[in-house]
Amino acid sequence: MADLTTDFVGIKSPNPFWLASAPPTDKEYNVRRAFEAGWGGVVWKTLGAEGPPVVNVNGPRYGAIYGADRRLLGLNNIELITDRPLEVNLEEMARVKADYPDRALIASIMVPCEEAAWKAILPRVAETGADGIELNFGCPHGMSERGMGSAVGQVPEYIEMVTRWCKEYYDRPVIVKLTPNITDIRKPAEAARNGGADAVSLINTINSITSVDLDQMCPQPTIDGKGSHGGYCGPAVKPIALSMVSEIARAEATRGMPISGIGGVTTWRDAAEFMALGCGNVQVCTAAMTYGFRIVEEMTRGLSAWMDEKGYTSTAEIVGRAVPNVTDWQYLNLNYVTKARIDQDACIQCGRCYAACEDTSHQAIAMKPGRVFEVVDEECVACNLCVDVCPVEDCITMVELEPGATDPRTGRVVESEYANWTTHPNNPAAQAAE
């Protein structure tokens, strides 16, 4: 069987599935249950400095977005960092690490943006035996209003400064957790690298209001008639996370930087996709909160089976394999031509493809007598909308035209010399170079 063991910046774990810093990792009881279920690592819920206690709301902390079948697609979270005393958390972390030496245990930390605050907490965290720290520069609510969390993560100079402090006062790996609430994710990642960070993790939650109670006229979750923005997570944020991960993986200034992928990981396939785009491991939160800790069993089994099928023997062989195929739009091959094809045996004659294409696209699907739907090649631009709206998997597919064939829509001959696309006159980049 494939070896799922991972070595992420020197931190070894039996598999690449870690629990992200969040409610599931807030105390010893939860973390022990997680390790017994098979999780490879845990990022302990964010620790704060000693002082005035953190006080969370005693009302709803989560809002939800559902699919048509009430499948949870996204959570909005207004919970703050741990509201348990620092000393209690540190004692529990030390006990857990001692009992599970083969599992990764990372301490997430968020303290004021002052050197003295970081200098004070880091030695105490080191005493727990934790394998490393994660700097929480991502939380978009509550703590950001206090000058922490995403308030730091949105300023590259602050990221570099705090990271340097941590590398000076802490001798184990430093992971910087990035906020997605920023225009260009490459800038904070570069700042983390310049500050000496061993890795980055992303994405943290996206600033959001998921819904409004139209009776109370208040955002949800509602606390005594008022609501606040929170952090959005779950399967719905995965595409945003994948894009940001890929930008860091392929940018010259951060290429090769270790990445821990976060954002909607629910299945082994999600994990494999993050890893293919450059992540050495993945962190999970919403899936565990939705289905419980034992979901990791499906993740590990599925990833192992897929790796066996593809001939991968270690997770390191997956990491970054898709990065070379991520490019800018201007380099996409405009001579590559596909057309939609409908499997009449699989078609249930619902008409979704026809309605979508006729009303909103290119009128490239005809409805024949008996509700038979056929593609009109002369109008089809291969936009893929019919594939996306079809309720039957693989009923509609995109089929590549053979080299030398004539595209019925444009009259152009399909070219086979795709390798010459970088110098092809139809390539905007080549035109600009001239």
Image: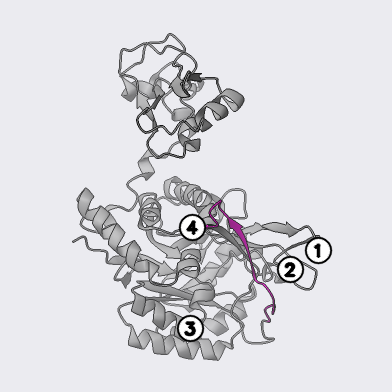
Q: How far apart are marks 3 and 2 (CA)?
A: 35 Å
Q: Mark 4 points at which residue?
A: 264
Amino acid type, label 3 = Val
Which disc is residue 216 wearing? Answer: 1
Whether label 4 touches label 2, CB < 8 Å: no
Other residues around mark 1 within 10 Å, as few (<14) / some (14–19) / many (≥20): few
Q: Name the residue under label 3.
A: 125
Compared across the picture, whether 20 is left or right of 154 comes to: left
Q: Mark 2 points at which residue?
A: 222
Rendering coords of residue 5 (x, y %): 27, 66
Amino acid type, label 2 = Thr
Asked which colour scheme the image uses, the reply is one colour
Rendering coords of residue 23 (x, y %): 54, 75
Q: In which quarter of the image is the N terminus?
A: bottom left
Instruction: Tell which tag, 2 or 1, sits nearer the viewer.
Output: 1
Magenta part of the protein: which range?
A: 55-71
Is 67 part of what is drawn in magenta? yes
Q: Earlier in the sequence, mark 4 or mark 2?
A: 2
